[in-house]
Amino acid sequence: MVLDLVVIGLAIAVFPLSGTAFVLVLSAERGICKGLAFILAWLACFVAVLAAVLITTGGEPPAPKSAPSTAASAAKLAIGLGLVGFGWYRRRNRGRTGQRRRSSGGLMSRLDRLSMWTAAALGPLLQPWGLVAAGAATVVSADLSHASSYLALIGYCLLAASSLLTMEIYTTFAPDSARVRLGRLRTWIETHQEQALVSVALVAGLFLVSRSIAQLTS
């Protein structure tokens, strides 16, 4: 479970769409407060998904080869295949991304005027839900009778949110330097967003496919 959560958490942390949106939120007026609202809503939704899974399982992992265990592995396989298909589709249609990048200026002007509540709503909305679902399917095997499972879940949550938390803390304590560096980061993401999105989708998808097949056939 731990290896799966580390890979999924890293994929969530570097997911370019939510990262780009968060950089734009931080660059807006009162960006630090809006960024905090974004993160709190993001984390609340993220933790709620995990809590729902743990409540359903009662904190006890299903027996190997049981119906719940097989269903969780099958769900991860389906999500992995979906990510691979999504990555392949985006790779085949890279030429159509220019228009999306040109629209970022209009998006920036809208984000300058967004309210605190809207910033909070963007957090859950822009989560990579396919990866979040894969993490939820992995958490099915968590055994809460061991402290190590709690540590793994806490580490997973922190790892998934690490990029957002790092940018928020950096902007809070070094606003001038952060403004310059986040501006460069935004430019880099906008230039390489499609390649990053394809890479994350394909790597995470292939990992989930291989792991789920191994679990289903072992």
Image: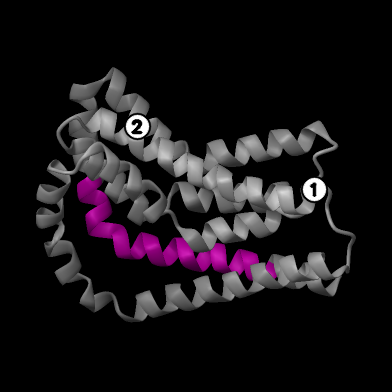
Q: Residue at x 54, y 39 (%)?
A: 159
Give percent across and percent down for residue 144. Answer: 80, 39
Q: Is residue 22 within the magenta segment? A: no
Of 173 and 66, which appears nearest the observer?
66
Q: Nearer the viewer, residue 121 or 146?
A: 121
Q: Image quadrant for the C terminus?
A: bottom right
Looking at the image, residue 155 lies above or below residue 91? above
Compare marks 1 and 2 and give the one earlier in the sequence.
2
Residue 70 circle label: none
In the figure, residue 112 lies in which quadrant?
top left
Along the horizontal axis of the image, is 173 left or right of 129? Answer: left
- From the viewer's perspective, is the residue at label 1 or at label 2 nearer? 1
Residue type highlighted by circle 1: Gly
Instruction: Mark yes or no: residue 126 visible.
Output: no
Residue designated by label 2: 36
Residue 25 located left or right of residue 109: right
Q: Write the start and end of the magenta stretch as one range.
A: 186-210
Disc 2 residue type?
Answer: Leu
Percent from the top left, x then y, of residue 136?
63, 55
Determine the main secondary structure of the stretch shown in magenta. helix
Q: Name the residue under label 1.
A: 58
| Residue drawn at 34 percent across, 56 percent down | 17
Label 1 and label 2: CA atoms lie apart by 32 Å
User: Which residue: 68% across, 52% down?
Assistant: 53
